[in-house]
Image: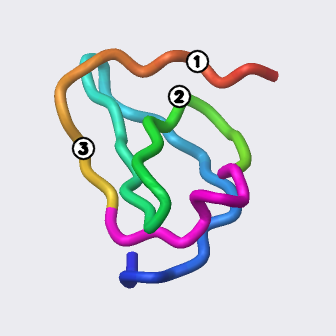
Amino acid sequence: MVPGQQVGSFDNRPLPGCQVILHALSGDLTLCAGRAVVPPAQRRAIFYEIRTGASAPCAV
C-alpha cells in the first residue's frame, strides 16, 4: 500500500486471532473479516497493521 492511496473496498481474510487496522488520514479503522466498503472519510490510507485480536465478521 502506498501512503495516501485511495482504498474503496477490501476482502479481509485474517488468520485466527489476528485483525487488520487501516490507518487513514482521518483515523483508524479495524477491518471486519470478509468483504466490505471503506467509509468515505477513511479512504485515504496511510498504512495498515496486522496485530493480535479478534476480527468481527462483516455484516452482509
Report if the CB atoms under discs 3 and 1 are less than 8 Å apart: no
Q: Secondary structure at mark 2?
A: loop
Would you place residue 2 above or below residue 34 in this image? below
Residue 57, horizontal then vertical, whole percent:
58, 18
Answer few, some or many: residues within 10 Å of disc 2's Cα (few below 14, many 20 plus, some between 14 and 19): many
Give the labeled residue for mark 1.
57
Stretch in magenta: 38-47
The mark found on residue 46 in the picture is none
Displayed quadrant of residue 2: bottom left
Q: Secondary structure at mark 3?
A: strand
Give the labeled residue for mark 2.
33
First in sequence, mark 2 or 3: give its number: 2
Instruction: Based on the picture, tell me whether residue 46 belongs to the magenta stretch.
Output: yes
Q: Amino acid at mark 1?
A: Pro
Left or right of 27 on screen, residue 47? left
Give the labeled residue for mark 3.
50
Q: Secondary structure at mark 1?
A: loop
Residue 28, horizontal then vertical, whole percent:
40, 47
- Residue positioned most to the front: 26
Answer few, some or many: residues within 10 Å of disc 3's Cα (few below 14, many 20 plus, some between 14 and 19): few
Residue 15, horizontal then vertical, whole percent:
31, 28
Which residue is painted at 61% across and 52% down in the image?
A: 10
Which residue is painted at 36% across and 44% down in the image?
A: 21
Q: Amino acid at mark 3?
A: Ile
Which residue is painted at 58% across and 58% down in the image?
A: 42
Q: Amino acid at mark 2?
A: Ala
How far apart marks 3 and 1 lie (CA) works out to 16 Å
Instruction: Based on the picture, tell me whether residue 13 belongs to the magenta stretch.
Output: no
Answer few, some or many: residues within 10 Å of disc 1's Cα (few below 14, many 20 plus, some between 14 and 19): some
